[in-house]
Image (cartoon, rainbow, N blue to C red):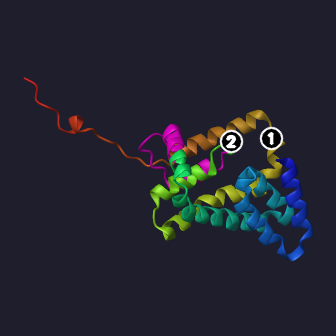
Amino acid sequence: MNERLVAALAIMEASGYIAPFLFILFHILRQFLFIPVALVCMAGGVLFGSLFGTLYSLIGLTLLSITFYFVIGRFPAFYHRLLRLKEKWFGRSAALTTGQIAILRLIPFVHYQLLNLCLLERKPKIKSFARASLISNIPLAFFYTVFGQYIKRFSPPILAMILLGLVVLFYLLREKVRVFEWREFFPSKQN
């Protein structure tokens, strides 16, 4: 995996003016090379600096999500596999908010396309999906581009505090809905 990333970065560095376009395209192709999103965003910070690296990562991630929107229907096996994974991780009737998806995108081991599926279930129209995708990608692009180079230097207690903070944010940003079963709402008369 490292060799692929280093080779792609070397090509982008040598490409001059088309480097931003190659980087955005690399965001879309990265999933086929099995390179984590966080590494690509960190590479954007190294290649283009914090501001442009975040901007290019945000464009690439949003285009990736929009590509997912149009392509997922053509791959029913992958779609059903993601649905099973969603049910396993979040439960059958989980409806994650855009804020929760944004927080989960910050956790490196959460599947990016699984979160796109959760977003698609919540926002089925292309315009609302693209907007929610853009919003949920902002923290990911910003955090890993700007702070990504410093994560290696964090001690394990600091990393544990960051993950605990993300769990608390995930809980606070949940949709507050209480589901009543029929028998709770209308108790049956027992003689």
Q: Kindly identify the residue that appears in the image at 84 percent across and 54 percent down.
A: 5
Q: Kindly identify the residue that appears in the image at 61 percent across and 65 percent down.
A: 67
Mark 2, residue position:
162
For the C terminus, give its image quadrant: top left
Mark number for residue 39?
none
Q: Is residue 95 above or below residue 52?
A: above
Left or right: residue 118 versus residue 29 is left
Do residues under tags 1 and 2 come within 8 Å of each other at their CB atoms?
Answer: yes
Q: Kindly identify the residue that appears in the image at 70 percent across and 59 percent down.
A: 141
- SS under mark 1: loop
Where are the magenta residues, as a range?
83-107
The image shows residue 11 at horizontal and vertical percentages of 89, 64
**Camera-nearest residue between 97 and 159:** 97
Q: Kindly identify the residue that appears in the image at 32 percent across and 42 percent down.
A: 179
Distance of label 1 from label 2 (alpha carbons): 10 Å
Q: Amino acid at mark 1?
A: Phe
Mark 1, residue position:
154
Q: Amino acid at mark 2?
A: Ile
Query: Residue 99 lies in magenta, yes or no?
Result: yes
The image shows residue 66 at horizontal and vertical percentages of 59, 65
> Which badge, 1 or 2, is on the more N-terminal residue?
1
Q: Is residue 185 above or below residue 102?
A: above
